[in-house]
Image: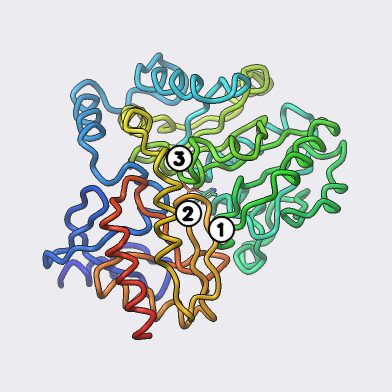
Amino acid sequence: MNQRQLFLQHVAQTSDAPLALEIVKAEGSTLWDVDGKSFIDLIAGISVCNIGHRHPAVTEAIKKQVDQYLHLLVYGELVETPQVAYAHHLARYLPRSLNAVYFTNSGAEATEGAMKLAKRYTGRTQIIAFNQSYHGSTQGALSIIGDEYWRNAYRPLLPGILHLNYNSFSDLEHIDTSTACVVAETVQAERGIVAPSNAWMQALRKKCTETGCLLVLDEIQTGFGRTGSLWGFEQIQVIPDIVLLGKALGGGMPLGAFIADQKIMRCLTGNPVLGHITTFGGHPVSCAAGLAALKVLQEENITGSVKEKEKLFLSLLKHPQIKTVRSSGLLIAVEFESFKKNKTIIDLCIEAGALTDWFLFAPQCMRIAPPLNISDEEIVKACGIIIDAIDKA
Ligand code: PLP
């Protein structure tokens, strides 16, 4: 059996039609398959590889840490320098109230931890989230995602969850003194890039403050420069009580985090002690890689060119068959008439050497979320491939 057959037989599948490309190398914004064919990466591992694949600063940091130690003990027991250094650096570049970092293994676990923390801090049980939002696939995170098609087969899910409409001022009335937290994406990514109005986000912040519930902003996909600022919430001038990070947080290694003020986070230390525990959360190699990646993002001012690159994409993504293009920095959704049409175009793009896909709650939209340091030449080439594919579809 070849690798592909072994993959289909022994690696658990989540769809009947996995891409199943056999990638053997990745660097910058390029992937190479086993036959030497190259692909421009337009999805960056789903908003993970914001500084491109295998940046030398990241691989160096990983090698250095591997030579010192790997896993030592469960989260929170030892002073592990990679964790401390990364938490300290993150706190320097976050608002002052976001100063205590709880590292997890994934984005979904960050969502889980934040939901538990909000319940403990407020003593309340209701959790509010939004229709067409995505926060992860574990039972708790699944309970708050905003699409019944994805939730339905796994009921019963968590009780006490209320879904409101994103961007609806009138729906904010449902937030009250029984609400522990409101969980919202800074930009709804899997809906096909839907940004809130600043006024609505600010009204949401005000309502949370008035009712004493915590505002949790999910920056798992929008963080680390993706939307053109280090954090998406900078552009809407709203500071959350808890921020969720993941994806690019680990610089290509698995890492998530929920971050809050120490006074909130301390709820996890007593009654019961060990209020949230994990063996591998904040793995030293992941923290070393993540810190190196964040420093590259900042030192090379990669975020600074995101808006210009977004403009270049938008100027080139013009075709009568494109219904709309919605974007927030280098998080771009190109909408076609149907999933069928989109899938045909995606397959043609991959065949021609540009890797893209669709969005969970917007299958008629093509996802464009490349490494943030993709070059202008690569953007021009990728858009050429997309336009050709649309012509052929
Ligand atoms: N939140 C958002 C906005 C996401 O896009 C994702 C993953 O796509 C998650 C949470 C869950 O992260 P993970 O897949 O690491 O559990």
Q: As shown in the figure, which amino acid type bears the numbered disc 2?
A: Leu
Residue drawn at (27%, 27%) of the image: 70
**Which image quadrant is residue 319 in?**
bottom left
For the residue with label 2, is its CB less than 8 Å from the closest atom of ligand 1? no
Q: As shown in the figure, which amino acid type bears the numbered disc 1?
A: Ile
The N terminus lies in quadrant: bottom left
Q: Nearest the camera: 197 or 221? A: 197
The tag earlier along the polypeptide, 1 or 3, is 1
Q: According to the image, label 3 marks what residue?
A: 225
In the rendered image, residue 88, in percent from the top left (x then y), is placed at 45, 18
**Which image quadrant is residue 123 in?**
top right
The tag earlier along the polypeptide, 1 or 2, is 1
The figure's colour scheme reads rainbow
In the rendered image, residue 303, in percent from the top left (x then y), is placed at 41, 39
Q: Nearest the camera: 355 or 280? A: 355
Most extreme residue toward the bottom, as rendered? 392
Residue drawn at (85%, 34%) of the image: 211
- Label 1 to label 3, Cα distance in Å? 15 Å
The tag earlier along the polypeptide, 2 or 3, is 3
- Residue 193 bears which disc, if any? 1
Dot 1 and dot 2 residues touching (CB under 8 Å): yes
Residue 263 higher or lower than 345, as above or below: above
- Label 1 to label 2, Cα distance in Å? 7 Å
Residue drawn at (34%, 49%) of the image: 371
Q: Which element carries disc 3, helix, strand or loop?
A: loop
Residue 352 higher or lower than 191, as above or below: below
